[in-house]
Image: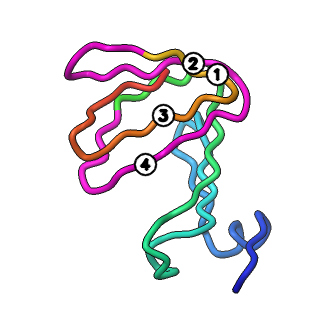
Amino acid sequence: MFTRTLDELERLGRIKFPADASFRSARFVTAVDGMGFSYNENRVKAGFDLTIWLKHHWEANYIVSGKGEVTDLTSGERWPLEAGVLYVVGPNDRHRLH
């Protein structure tokens, strides 16, 4: 059993920011922990727009607040994102988050 705090993650270098500070990813559980899954808290700034391809894993994302859209770049299908929505992407899902 263990617990993690944001302060601890910061000390361990497990809070990541891109150069333009458009989002923050606090990595609570990673592969290093040997749990077989990861858990991150991601915060995205308004106006954020990113094309993503997770080549080696699946990811589930639950929207706590705010609004946006995710687009499947293969099919062109789009889904609105807002509080209470979960979206899941995997290794074959090139997508755009905005």
For the residues marked 2 and 4, what is the alpha-carbon distance in whole angstroms? 17 Å
Residue 85 figure quarter: top right
Q: Nearer the viewer, residue 71 or 47?
A: 71
> Which mark is nearer the camera, 3 or 2?
3
Which quarter of the rendering shows the N terminus?
A: bottom right
Q: Amino acid at mark 4?
A: Glu
Q: If you read the primary sequence from the N terminus, does the residue marked by circle 1 or circle 3 appear first?
A: 1
Which residue is disc 2 drawn over? 68
At x 70%, y 66%, the residue is 10
Give the label on residue 82, or none.
1
Q: CA distance from mark 2 to mark 1?
A: 6 Å
- Choose between 36 and 10: the one closer to the eye: 36
Query: Mark 2, mark 1: which one is toward the viewer?
Result: 1
Q: Which residue lies at the image location 50% right of the left edge and 70% below the top edge?
A: 30
**In the picture shown, does residue 92 fall above or below 73?**
below
Residue sitting nearer the eye, 83 or 55: 83
- Residue at image location 60% in from the left, 39% down from the top: 62
The answer to whether 60 appears left or right of 56 in the picture is right
Give the CA separation, mark 4 to mark 3. Answer: 8 Å
Judging by the rendered image, the residue that carries numbered circle 3 is 87
**Looking at the image, is mark 3 or mark 2 earlier in the sequence?**
2
Q: Is residue 52 left or right of residue 19?
A: left
- Mark 2 or mark 1: name the one nearer the start of the chain: 2
Marks 2 and 1 close (CB-CB < 8 Å)? yes
Q: Secondary structure at mark 3?
A: strand
Considering the numbered disc 1 on the image, is that residue within a helix, a strand or a loop?
A: strand
Ranked by sequence position, the earlier of labels 4 and 3 is: 4
